[in-house]
Image (tube, helix red, strand yellow):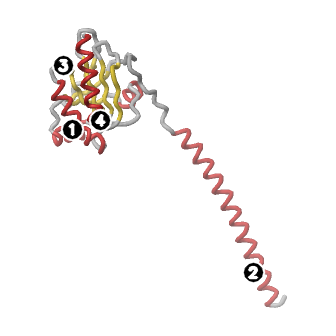
Amino acid sequence: MTAARWQRLSTKAYGLFLHLSLVALAVFTLLLVRDNRQLRSQNAPPEVAQLAVDRIVEPVAVTGLDGISRTLEWNTSGPDRLLLVFTTSCPACLQNQVAWRSLHAALDDDVEIIGISLDGPAATQTYREAQDLTFEVVMASDRQAFTAAYGISAVPTTFHIDGDGRIQGVWRGGLSADQIAEVEAVASRSQDLG
């Protein structure tokens, strides 16, 4: 076999090898994409049911910053509550603190206002002190159970719940001036009925 013929053969073999390698890579890429989609669908968080006004919610298991656990119960003689759900790392929650402070100042005598952190005690305590929060702050004792039961898919979320545990209003995301007025109106209307 001559050197020229050997070189042509090895060039063809090399080209064939490259083509087969590209086909194999394409097949492996398609398989990886398919497997990735299957894994995403298996690991996707369950759909969170959005809570509607007038729905009655379950009591909330919380832990205070002092480490004492308790349950926020609902009863007809109890006050209406605003539950302010947040995380300590959420920029929208941080911006919403201004709105929540405003609501606390306007409604303090009429509605019990409780901030519920979805984070642990150290982060929550640091956040409360840094933000100088004047309303009570607790942590959800079981974050997953709480977010599932209350339909929390994002924070911040503001709930107005009457003494019976019936939702009077749900506001998701940062509160605008109009929404602050709406929360105040719902709380006032609820107090007039109660």
| Secondary structure beneath label 3 | loop
- Is 137 situated above or below 192? below
Q: Is the residue marked by circle 4 packed among few (<14), some (14-19), or many (20+) residues within 10 Å? A: many
Q: Is the residue marked by circle 1 packed among few (<14), some (14-19), or many (20+) residues within 10 Å? A: some
Number of the label disc, if any, that sits on residue 61 = none
Is the residue under label 2 in contact with that under label 3 (CB below 8 Å)? Answer: no
Q: Give the Cα separation between the discs numbered 2 and 1.
A: 72 Å
Q: Give the residue number, with chain letter if any, for mark 4.
A: 175
Q: Pick the residue in front: 172 or 77.
A: 172
| Secondary structure beneath label 4 | loop
Q: Amino acid at mark 1?
A: Val
Q: Amino acid at mark 4?
A: Leu
Q: Give the Cα separation between the discs numbered 3 and 4.
A: 20 Å
Using the rendered view, name the quadrant where residue 38 is placed: top right
Q: Give the residue number, with chain letter if any, for mark 2.
A: 11
Number of the label disc, if any, that sits on residue 110 = 3
